[in-house]
Amino acid sequence: MKLHWPLIAVVALLGVGLSSVCSAAIGKLLDRGELVDEWHCKDPIDYPAPVLVRALVYEKGYFNGDVIAAGVTNPAVYSVQGFQMRWDFGSDGDGGAPYSLVLQPNGDASYYDFTGVPKGEKVSASQRYKCKKVK
């Protein structure tokens, strides 16, 4: 079962009844503003196939992106590194994000799974997609 930590934090705050200051801080963390970018990613070989992954970007917030696959929405930290767009998501228990979706300017995307990989070791993409910007 995949846990969604921002949602758990909000439920915990509501259940415990912490001060309004803490509630406001969590609310600010989860306030992502407007959706500014949306990418639909498909199998690069069978490109007319259905959308497999959706990558979203919001205008603000710590979790300023989402990666949606197999009906599961994963809050993500979106960043731009050089020309590449990157969504890091999931939790490895040590504060790290074990999954990444990296999108090139030409729409080629790669999915990386770092679970069980020693820190600093290189990993090859386990899946590839062809993506198109829809918003």
Image (cartoon, rainbow, N blue to C red):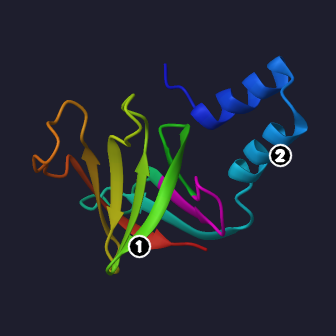
Residue at x 50%, y 66% (from the top left corner): 39
The magenta stretch is: 54-64
Image-based side of 125 in relation to 47, left or right: left
Q: Reply above or below: 77 against 39.
A: above
- State the residue at coordinates (73%, 23%): 12
Quadrant for the C terminus, please: bottom right
Residue 8, percent from left and from top: 66, 27
Who is closer to the viewer here, 46 or 53?
53
Does residue 47 appear left or right of residue 59 in this picture?
left
In this picture, is 108 found above or below 92?
Answer: below
Q: Secondary structure at mark 1?
A: strand
Q: Is residue 92 visible?
A: yes
Query: Residue 69 location in percent, x, y?
Result: 47, 43
The residue indicated by pointer 2 is: 24
Give SS at disc 2. Answer: helix
What residue is shown with label 1?
80
Separation (CA) of disc 2 from disc 1: 28 Å
